[in-house]
Image: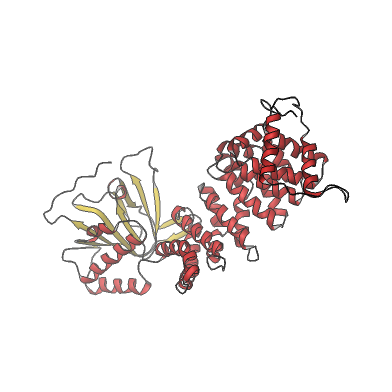
Amino acid sequence: MTSDGGNNDANVDWTALLKWSLAQQQGFDADAMPRRELTKDDMKFFYNAVAASNAGGKSDAVMILESVERTRDGGTDEEAAVALEDLIDRCEQTENAGNMLSAGGAEALTAMLRAGRGEIRKLAARALATVTQNHPEAQVRAANAGAVEAILDVVRIDNDDGLRGASLWALSCLIRDCVEAAKAFKAAGGVEVCTQFISMPTLNDRIRAKALHLGRHAFVQSEENMSDAVEHGAIKSASECVRSEDVNVREAAATLLLLIAQCVDFTKNPKAVDQFRSAKAHVAKALSNMQFTTGPDAESNEPTRQALEQLIAMLTDAFSKAELACVHDLLENEGWLKNEQAMRFSPLPSWLVVVGQRLYQIAVEVGFVMDDERPLFNFSQCIINQYTPPGGLTPHVDLRAFGDLIASISLCSTVAMDFAPVEPNANMQSNLTLRLDHGDVLIFKGDARWRWTHAIPSRQVDIFGAERVERAHRISITLRTMDPDGHVLEVPAT
């Protein structure tokens, strides 16, 4: 090496330099010079010297990679570990990560995951996480090199917590917003592995939190992933985690549950409905426990509390069984059910006004409307319809004489309601089927009010996934607003 930065030694022996570094830190024998620890300045000089001696040649990240491969093939685990640590440090810079990947880094790290031993596997997983984090090109290269499958194979057979933690972090970095990695993850059974880690009661809290974070990326990437997660009990397992004594596990579990509730298609995943209904008790208990925390504990619990409150609002039934029974009695006693259809205009009975207020509160709690949209719930018209199988409802959009928001409550029998766009649009889903159970509430607003038809097909039986539901007597309560002067509304512009 020359001091002027020239490239007199293009074939620098990186392994020799690596061994020199080890010698400085550990010493080879009792007669060696006194050991000294390398400072950050020492390391900076060391790397700058290497880069200078190879100006116009290979980057230091690539040279470290070559050293890693040489120590893997002929060196000790200790040498390989030091080289991998160096590689991780250097690849925190995106440019270095790109250079290393171009030199076959993804393939080399994947090989170490498959063939290495405990510490080497852990460092290889850490290196993959560092290289692929927020680096789309690196994610694709690593996915194509088989890194996702290699990591999943490792976590299935190795119980070391350090390795598990590094591997779950690497998977999160790999699959986030990466189609190729997500497909590999799905094909290799990654959703099942992630769900199993979440459900392990004896698992280290730090590892379980990482598994929950991985679920946030993995479960919502596709309908197939979501279906797999529901099938393997991800909702049930995550709901049990919200009562963990570890604040990080609680927060990760609450965030994951809220994300699933917001993204899952309940029509395609009917088990999710049952799992969330079962989860309500865990969520409510966790919220109750947080009410008694004070000081720093209360502050650390705040993100979890907010997520759980939003989740419980989504999971809470609009009306209790007792309230629904009361509504049915009122309909019967006031003569609403003497005919298949009954209608009433303002002023509405006081109990219907209370129902309207409850619907507004629920819509605000789940973020469907803003506080200042209260006038949309000042209902001035109510229609009660009764349906006997196989009776249904023809596709329609409610009359323009009614307001911008329409609310409906379904009573008694379960039924399937179909939705379809008035004018087919490439940006819109072609159709949608929604399951309505006793007490379910529908609120139509925006496009759902004006640009989609809703209908109930005439038939005796509805099919929801693998479930076959025989229809029975059903009642719907529909609440709407009307202009007092009878003006017809214009359909809002897109």
| Applied colour scheme | secondary structure
User: Do we see residue 452 in this rendering?
Assistant: yes
User: Do we see residue 62 in this rendering?
Assistant: no
Q: Up-down: is 181 above or below 266? A: above
Q: Nearer the viewer, residue 204 or 316?
A: 204
Q: Residue at x 49, y 61 (%)?
A: 254
Compared across the picture, whether 461 is left or right of 401 comes to right
Q: x, y percentage for residue 69?
A: 76, 38
Residue 113 image-quadrant placement? top right
Residue 438 image-quadrant placement? bottom left
Q: x, y percentage for residue 269?
A: 49, 55
Q: Up-down: is 11 above or below 261? A: above
Q: Residue at x 82, y 42 (%)?
A: 75
Q: Nearer the viewer, residue 121 or 311?
A: 121
Report the quarter where the N terminus lies: top right
Q: x, y percentage for residue 310?
A: 41, 61
Compared across the picture, whether 452 is left or right of 160 comes to left
Q: Nearer the viewer, residue 144 or 264?
A: 144
Report the quarter where the C terminus lies: top left
Compared across the picture, whether 196 is left or right of 319 comes to right
Q: Residue at x 27, y 66 (%)?
A: 357
Q: Up-down: is 323 above or below 219? A: below
Q: Nearer the viewer, residue 227 or 119?
A: 119
Q: x, y percentage for residue 251?
A: 51, 61
Residue 416 image-quadrant placement? bottom left
Could you tell me how many numbered marks the image carries? 0
